[in-house]
Image: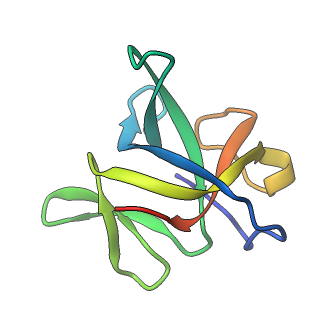
Amino acid sequence: MTVQREAPLESLQAQLIGTLEIDTSTNCLVVRIAVGTGDRLVDVDVAWPPGWSVAIRDGEIVLIDAAGQTARRLGDEVWVGGGSVDADQAGVVSCTGRKQVFVASGFSGP
């Protein structure tokens, strides 16, 4: 899982809508989105806010917020506010090894 070390200096205004999944090739938590006409799926490496983590609760993989609460479960649809930037610019190491990450500021939808 990619996590920000510090909150971003800028407020990014994009929205990422997809499904919380595990990228089986890297074992990383990602948001899977449909691109084009929806027939192709792409995994986006999300740099979650500082203090967020992944855990297993009640036998399910869940995303945990900085307060220790379950934010979402694997397979949930997520609407994430933030924006795409180079991992170096965000000051993170991409879990998937990609050059760009989506820097999350939190959830903006269901």
Q: Quadrant of residue 23?
A: top left
**Rendered location of residue 101, percent (x, y):** 68, 44
Closer to the camera in the image, 77 or 64? 77
**Which quarter of the rendering shows the C terminus?**
bottom left
Does residue 27 appear left or right of residue 57 in this picture? right
Which residue lies most toward the front here?
37
Count every numbered label the image shows and give the total. 0
Is the residue 40 above or below the residue 32 in the image? Answer: above
**Side (left or right) of 90 relative to 42:** right
Tell me: residue 69, above or below residue 81: below
Q: Position of residue 29 (x, y in %)?
A: 44, 46
**Residue at the location (28% across, 51% down)?**
76
Q: Residue furthest bottom?
A: 67
Foreground of the two, 95 or 83: 83
Residue 102: x %, y % from top left? 64, 48
The x and y percentages for residue 92 are 74, 54
The quadrant where residue 58 appears: bottom left
Q: Is residue 51 left or right of residue 86?
A: left
Against 99, residue 82 (above or below) is below
- As drawn, the residue found furthest toward the left would be 58
Observer-nearest residue: 57 or 101? 101
